[in-house]
Image (spheres, rainbow, N blue to C red):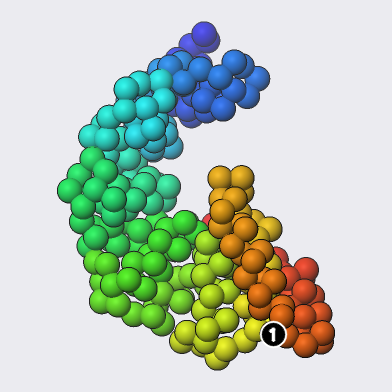
Amino acid sequence: MSAFVDDDANAQYNLGLKFAKGEGVPQDFAVAMSWYRKAADQGNASAQNSLGVMYAKGQGVPRDNAAAMSWCGKAAAQGHANAQFNLGFMYCNGQGVPRDYAAAVSWYRKAADQGDARAQFNLGAMYAKGQGVLRDSAVAILWFRKAADQGDANGQFNLGIIYYNGLGVPQSHVLAHMWFNLAAARFDASGKENRNKAVKNCDLVATKMTPAQLAEAQKLAREWKPKPER
């Protein structure tokens, strides 16, 4: 390997990414780990986070939640939004640390403020449930909307429920249908059950709408565009 790669943390991280994804090379988590570690030891935040994720999943190494927490913590301290989300998830679920909802909220908020849609949704969920914060439906809706506006399927699904039931907003079958429709199109293969729920809810709302309302909802969904924050 060239001296450039041996010394350059970004190049090392990118090599690790290629081996982790199998892009242009055979997928090899152990080799990916090796390159991530070289970059992480030089302080590369993306590599530190990726190393933490691989420890959490047991990819290329035995699963080790404490190591995952340590590496994600190093990246999070540098302001890495994905790592901050990962720390929030670990604290929320007691993964590698005792469950601590207040700490989870703190880390989710750091990532959410940087525009991480997953963190925005999870922060909304914690406000909705009163976990680590006082329950506040209005704040929950605000964060769900931020996530939904970026194309997060979970946020869109929740907004569909909120508008269908008029929870903290004026009831609107048009907007409920639009958000369920968008969510159904955005859940990936791992979210098949949620996608089916979104389709079912979309069909249910449609039975309560006039043809004009249904046409409006479908038009809104067609014209909708994500608004990324970062």
State the image quarter where residue 159 is shown. bottom right
Instruction: Indicate left or right for 110 with 205 as reference.
Output: left
Nearest to the observer: residue 223 or residue 78: 223
Say whether residue 201 is visible: yes
Nearest to the observer: residue 144 or residue 210: 210
Q: Residue at x 61, y 57 (%)?
A: 195
Q: Residue at x 53, y 83 (%)?
A: 165
State the image quarter where residue 139 is shown. bottom left
State the image quarter where residue 214 is shown. bottom right
From this view, report whether residue 103 is shown above or below residue 96: below
Instruction: Indicate left or right for 201 with 99 as reference.
Output: right
Q: Which residue is mark 1?
A: 208
Point out the residue furthest to the top here: 1
Neighbourhood count class around disc 1 (C-alpha, 10 Å): few under 14, some 14–19, many 20 upward: few
Instruction: Indicate left or right for 88 with 115 as reference.
Output: left
Q: Position of residue 57 (x, y in %)?
A: 39, 32
From this view, report whether residue 203 is shown above or below residue 23: below
Q: Secondary structure at mark 1?
A: loop
